[in-house]
Image (tube, grey):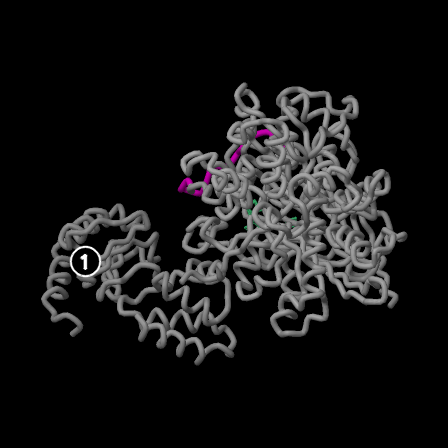
Amino acid sequence: MDRKMITLSVDGKTVTVPEGTRILDACNVAGIKVPSLCYLEDVSAHGSCGICVVEIDGYKRLVRSCLHTVKQDMVIHTHSNRVMSARKLNLELLLANHPLLCTTCERNLNCELQALALQLGVRESRFERTKKSIRPIDDSSPSIVRDPNACILCNRCVEVCANVQEVHAIEMMQRGLRTTVSTFFDEGLASSVCTNCGQCSLVCPTGAITEKSHESAVFDAIADPNLVVLVQTAPAIRVGLGEAMGLGEGSLVTGKMVSALRTLGFDRVFDTQFSADLTIMEESHELIQRLTNGGTLPMITSCSPGWIKFIETFYPDQLEHLSSCKSPQQMFGSIAKTYYAEQAGIDPRNIRVVSIMPCTAKKFEAGRSEIDSAFSYWRDKGSFTDDEYFCDVDYVLTTRELARMLKRIGIDFAHLEDGKFDDPLGQSTGSAVLFGATGGVMEAALRTAYETITKTKLDALEFEQIRIGAGIREATIMIGETPLKVAVANTLANARVLLDQIQEGKSPYAFIEVMTCPDGCLGGGGQPIPTNKEIRRKRAMSIYEEDRGMPIRKSHENPSIQELYTSFLKQPLGHLSHQLLHTTYVKRGAYPE
Amino acid sequence: MNDRANEIAAIVSKHRERHGALLSILEAVQRTNEHNYLPKQELVMVAKELGVPLSQIYSVVTFYAFFNLKAQGEHVITVCRGTACHTRGSKPLLDNVLHMLGIELDEDGMATTPDYRFTVHTVACFGQCALAPVIAIDEVIHSMVTEEKLATMIEALSARKEGA
Ligand code: SF4
Ligand code: SF4
Ligand code: FES
């Protein structure tokens, strides 16, 4: 399997790299990071911007180092005058059509175009704008806002949507000066097959794709003395937020995050991990029930809302494979506005639930019309009338939005003391934190299902085979004497592979976990920018570290969850569970009728 | 509409295995459309039959100038708005045609009469600057057009029987 090695010269330095290496990467080996813009490892190699050009002896034209691979004895010059002025020219041409509104842009100080202008020494805009029209902003989606005027046509969003997610919501439309990224008939993301995953917002080098912000609404809710504002934090926030606040990649900041949220003014700081444990209780019992009663198998997890919209859109006939469990975010909302409201003596109409999510699709999920269980619970009791309607979850902030809010109040994040979550909806286990990484829901469910089925203690808690790794991983887990065949997929392209298998009746699995984003929530569309493979790995290691350090590591041993069942829900899959914690799905289809 | 759906399904299945199928299919669908264009519902039918994403279909039809996304009249009048034509009076010519037909250009520089007899649209430049002002009627280029000449040609077309 040994790859042939190629020797070449980069700025007079001799380097040896495997055949097939991109010129750009070979230069990196020689210690030169060639500036690039449209290229993005594992996502996009479209070669449209011309920033990464280098000069090669014997080649008449400058060569785009992101597109071409090395050849034996190449002599490369990465910063000849010709190269430097070509890069600058290409950048200036892009800037001519880019609004120079950096100070008011969401990506100010975290923009690849801005950084390049600084790096390449662009100090003036020499060229006239060539594009004539101002294009409308697409804010039809509950999750994503697209501003084509800030777009530099790098094609990254199109490729991530088409290749990583296999959704194809957006494409390059028109030609020449009118070229733009858009949807079918420019109808907007909301009427498209878009899953709201936000991967496009994560890869966009500029401020052309951002999340739909709930920041002001949350500031307002916090400031309103009549409201009790509860915040819940998804597992992946504690391994992402630190990066956006200037700490190292993947730094684990659970305690600081709790203190920061308290300082921001939330009345209670709770944890989505509490409801992740609750999800495991319901979902593992659902699995056991399906296994013993001949229910539909494989059962597939349902906590990733991008994935839910994906299967509803592209595989509407396979919905019975989905677990009926709501996601942890939504379970939290319905428990907070029923059980917790009763217990704490707060009028649920005055409660606002804010979620901090690594995810843009959670904004869509919170607005799904079939999810209003807390309100129905009270209405059925005769407490409220229809016009007092409220949702289970009121606002959803991405990791990036939270970081912006924290910066806005001037918090010194790095020096915060570690805070502790409030009780009871702040208590959680090691199983729950695993939800933040691909394979984690499966691992957590197996820990509980194993002990529930076999009634014996599980000693080896860590299921290495299904932890972060390939896009699809499978394992056979012995539950006592019975083998359970499971699979884990991350990204929607990988989910497609497992769904096609199911559709052909060839799926060998009993239980499948699907996460929408690369490596799971820690690579979510709402996480700090940049997010790449290396960073995702570091975040995952922090997740595993947090699990190991938790005093309780199995969901069913969470005392607050046990109490919730004893005093309120009674039993998993019971009557109240069905009302509050389970949901239904919508057959959407990929083409309008 | 149902007949049209069957017709489109037939076009798709005729071409589907061939190289460059999408372009030939779209071309055939446009050609067989009553008003020589690709309405949204027909593009949805093609996408669905062929199993390609809607975004991809739209990308293709907006890339090629050949495809029409708006209903076209029986006769297509193309007015050149290049610099040479402009200085030799293409703007008054354009205004005149529009006035005669009682229509106004939309934001894409196109207009069609309600009876679908005429479509008027502009192009940036024909590349026939020496012959300016230039106007094409049903793809035949007419050079050094005057207002009178244009009026006569349009009247002649109007007088012709529909579909003749
Ligand atoms: S949010 Fe996801 S599905 Fe929607 S356009 Fe962006 S990448 Fe595609
Ligand atoms: S929207 Fe962003 S990612 Fe997409 S093409 Fe434009 S600049 Fe690139
Ligand atoms: S980075 Fe290579 S062409 Fe854009």
- On screen, residue A527 versus residue B6, left or right, reads right
Q: Which residue is located at x 52 percent, y 21 percent?
A: A226
Foreground: A186 or A556?
A556
The spot of residue A238 in percent (x, y) is 74, 36
Q: Is residue A392 magenta?
A: no
Q: From the Cβ of disc 1, is ligand 1 less than 8 Å away?
A: no
Taking the spot 47% from the left edge, 61% from the top edge, the residue there is B54
**Above or below: residue B11 compared with residue A574:** below
Which quadrant: the N terminus of chain A?
bottom right
Q: Is residue A492 visible?
A: yes
Label 1 neighbour load within 10 Å: few <14, some 14-19, many 20+: few
Q: Is A399 placed left or right of A126 in the picture?
A: right
Q: Is residue A158 above or below residue A496?
A: above
Q: As shown in the figure, which amino acid type bears the numbered disc 1?
A: Pro
Tell me what residue is drawn at x 33 percent, y 72 percent. B31
Residue topped by disc 1:
B114
Residue at 54 percent across and 33 percent down: it is A214
In this rendering, would A365 be left or right of A133?
Answer: right
| Towards the viewer: A340 or B102 | A340
To which chain does the residue with label 1 belong? B
Residue A56 placement (x, y as % from top left): 73, 53
Q: Is residue A49 visible?
A: no
Picture quarter containing residue A539?
A: top right
Per the image, label 1 sits on a secondary structure element best described as: loop
Range of the magenta residues?
Answer: A122-134
Q: Main secondary structure of the magenta part?
A: loop
**Picture quadrant where residue A341 is located:** top right
- Give the tally of numbered discs: 1
Up-down: is A269 above or below B70? Answer: above
Residue A130 drawn in magenta: yes
